[in-house]
Amino acid sequence: MNNHIKDQKKVLTIASLTEFGERYSYYVIQSLLIFFLIDNFHIAQAKSAALVGTVLSMVYLSALVGGYIADKLINYYRAAFLGAILMALGSLILALSTSENQLYLGLSFISISTGLIKSNMSSFIGRYYDQSNLSEGNRDFGFNIFYVGINLGSFFALFLASWLKDSYGFSAPFYSSLIVSTFICLNLLIGFVIVKKYIAPISLKLTSIIHICAVLVIYVAVVFIVLKHPDIANFSILIACVICAWILIASAQQRYWRNVLRATLFFMLSILYWALYFQIFISILLFIDFAVAPDLFGISLKPSQFLSIESIGVLLLGTVMGKLWLMRERKGKPVHDINKFNIAFVVIAFVFILLWVGIYYTQAQVKVSALIIAIAFVILAISELSLSAIGLSMVTKLAPPKFVSLYMGIWLVTLGIGGKLAGFLSSFIHITHNLAQTKANMSNGLIIFILLSILGIIVCTISRYLTRK
């Protein structure tokens, strides 16, 4: 047991540092993209919101490609290393971009790099726990620690991105992503030595290299076309849904059909949740920029720096909640995954209600207090930890053998579909320079978000009995 605990620390350190870097690079883009499109490329607000949703969807849809490359060709760890190289290339292209074609190309590389890193690092951790004799409580605890590492990257990106952009222009935060991506490559190279016994051996042939290159070129070309022609995005989402359904059906072997049904339910709930959560990067982010007083305890915050407050909440609460799940398990009263999902929907509903109340009780021509936003984002961390970190762990528990990375890909695809829905919903919430109208529009949008959250609560409550082992 002691050896497994020591190995757990090594595996989690390498994986968490990798996800730290991946999330830093990704969140630099996610927090700035809506402003990058509007301010730098002068794209209309509604179209920009829809495009951000498309980018979110393609970034997470790429997890299917990343899962395929890992499962069929080079395994989880090496796929993540390949992703780190492509992320560095994508960051460089974005830093140098002066045209929409360059923008779309850079985002295409970022898309596939995220799919290669994010799903496969999680799968790598899951494979470690499969090989160890540690309990499911330790697995959940480990994924919470891993999720803290993810949010460290998010925090630094969200805190620094706006400052770098305002001080040195849009290129500066993308150059910082290039530096961090290089760090990921070095970290994974060192990891080849430290955690070698948990990296599956392969025999890399020329045909495999050609196969990988062909898949990458085709996917980058597809993403580029989808971003350049948004009408195609909906069709790509449909194709992704068909692929996910095919994977689920193919994995439903006789002894695993119940796992597949449970996983399908969780995937559907995940889509709804992320459609709500990703509003903070589109409609709520724009609302903060136009209608929220920037001063918080004497500190003037940029819009993306407000988002870093939620990352702080995750950092502060991640280990606590992980230990809470472990403590409940040791007492013989484990919190089932469906109940954790239910907590996520209850808390996010409360967050939207708090934001709505903050707008309602502020005079029409007065900006909303920064304190309301800060409190809401700290509470939001509880919701995210109850679903996202647990979702990663849940996938590794439910996936049939030889389908772990593909299931992790489906999990990330649900984020992509949710992101696309988020862009669709936010395109109807028009943020203007008329403060009173902007607040009214946001209030109407929040009511819709609250109702959708309640729908999630109802589904979780009904389904809790169906998902028990």
Image: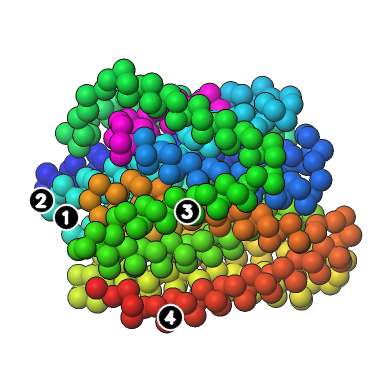
Camera-side mark, 2 or 1: 1
Task: Using the image as rendered, state which of residue 50 and residue 241 is in the foreground.
Answer: 241
Which residue is under mark 3? 242
Most common secondary structure along the magenta stretch = helix
Instruction: Name which of mark 3 and mark 4 comes first in the sequence.
Output: 3
x, y percentage for residue 65? 43, 39
Secondary structure of the residue carrying numbered label 3: helix
Specify start and end residues of the magenta stretch as a single range. 70-90
Which residue is under mark 1? 134
Here the colouring is rainbow
Camera-side mark, 4 or 1: 4
Task: Using the image as rendered, state which of residue 33 and residue 161 is in the foreground.
Answer: 33
Q: Is residue 288 visible?
A: no
Is residue 328 placed above or below 44 in the rendered structure? Answer: below
Camera-side mark, 1 or 3: 3
Give, as a three-letter code, the residue at label 2. Met
Secondary structure of the residue carrying numbered label 4: helix
Instruction: Name which of mark 4 and mark 1 comes first in the sequence.
Output: 1
Residue 335 is left or right of residue 197, and the answer is right
Which residue is under mark 2? 1
| CB atoms of marks 2 and 1 within 8 Å | yes
Residue 79 lies in the magenta-colored region: yes
**Residue occupying the point 43% across, 61% down:** 267
Give, as a three-letter code, the residue at label 3. Val
